[in-house]
Image (tube, rainbow, N blue to C red):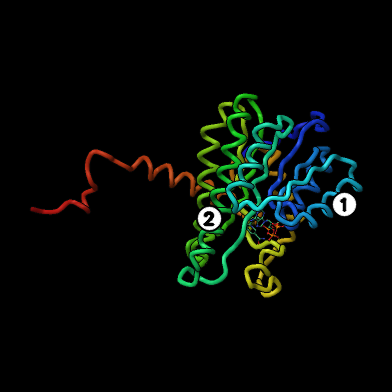
Amino acid sequence: MSTATQSTTDKSAQKVLITGASRGIGATYAKRFAKRGYQLVLVARSEEKLTQVAADIREETGVNVEIMPADLTLAADIARVAEKLNKDTQIEILVNNAGIAQRGNFTQQTPELISELIQLNVNALTQLAAAVAPRFVAQGKGSIINIGSVVGLAPEFGATLYGASKAYVQFLSQSLHQELSPSGVYVQAVLPAATRTDIWAYSGIDVNTLPEVMEVEELVDAALVGFDRKETVTIPPLHAPECWDELQAVRMALLGGLKQDEPAERYTTSR
Ligand SMILES: NC(=O)c1ccc[n+]([C@@H]2O[C@H](COP(=O)([O-])OP(=O)(O)OC[C@H]3O[C@@H](n4cnc5c(N)ncnc54)[C@H](OP(=O)(O)O)[C@@H]3O)[C@@H](O)[C@H]2O)c1
């Protein structure tokens, strides 16, 4: 993946907007960016938890922290956060982190859960990226961090709906990278594996029953190493980066093997 270029510019006037910042991975990103001197805009549903996270960060670092309670499954709340991203020119980084997992397998999903998951993991993330991208392009700078998952690489894991939403996040990020990087805008997809947060309890799984779990601070610190290196896809738990590089090489070879003017021989019918 590429070489480190850690920025040393003054961050005190710059803001990071983080969704899902009331706990877990989002709250950890908030603490880390505050330590780097950024001001913060924290988004989640629970005003009480946001208030507590904000107070702790202000006390520890002295940075300005705004909170924006919002339910990102609701169109009106997505629009409110989108407007903030579009209008507040101090926001230079969007961390699209809010997400939910699924309980049970695909045949057990209710229409309501399907809609909620797609609305949060796919629609809100996309709308917020779309709200900020034109401004970032016009300014010739800005970063969008999208939190995907290794589950998006693995239909075999049995989390069909959640995995499909995370495969979308990865595709969107890689494609946005192609589209926005020539304008100076950086897009990163972060693909965690099992990380110790409340998402597991909310999905009905005891995290302590999992064979291997990363601590949330380790996950975010590793993801920020990838951020500083301007990686397009950062997979903290992947110990063999050559596997990812080979996967991309095979994908490019596959694209080179497409011939659009005629079907492949194995699909031709003998008349
Ligand atoms: N933990 C893992 O093992 C793991 C692995 C791979 C990927 N991820 C991804 O990492 C991201 C963060 O997950 P996490 O593990 O930190 O989960 P978490 O501890 O459950 O935190 C989720 C955050 O999203 C917020 N949120 C949930 N529903 C929301 C809604 N409708 N509107 C606005 N905010 C909402 C929650 O706050 P409120 O409840 O206050 O709204 C909370 O701040 C997710 O995208 C997840 O898919 C996690």
User: Observer-nearest residue: 39 or 114?
Assistant: 114
Element at badge 1? Answer: helix
Q: Residue at x 62, y 29 (%)?
A: 135
User: Observer-nearest residue: 3 or 121?
Assistant: 121
Q: CA distance from mark 1 to mark 2?
A: 32 Å
The CB of the residue at mark 2 lies under 8 Å from ligand 1: no
Residue furthest to the front: 76
Classed neighbour count for the residue bearing mark 2: other residues with Cα under 10 Å, few (<14), some (14–19), many (≥20): some
Q: Position of residue 180 (x, y in %)?
A: 56, 31
Report the amino acid beneath label 1: Asp
Q: Residue at x 52, y 34 (%)?
A: 178
Q: How many marks?
A: 2
Residue 118, disc: 2
Q: Position of residue 72 (x, y in %)?
A: 63, 51
Q: Is residue 269 left or right of residue 120?
A: left
Res. 103 in view: yes
User: Observer-nearest residue: 181 or 231?
Assistant: 181
Q: Residue at x 67, y 44 (%)?
A: 95
Badges 1 and 2: C-beta atoms under 8 Å apart? no
Report the amino acid beneath label 2: Ile
Say which quadrant the N terminus sits in: top right
Residue 248, disc: none
Residue 89: quarter of image: top right
The residue pinned by badge 1 equals 56
Give whichever of discs 1 and 2 has the lower sequence position: 1
Res. 239 in view: no
Element at badge 2? Answer: helix
Q: Is residue 78 left or right of residue 215?
A: left
User: Observer-nearest residue: 139 or 187?
Assistant: 139
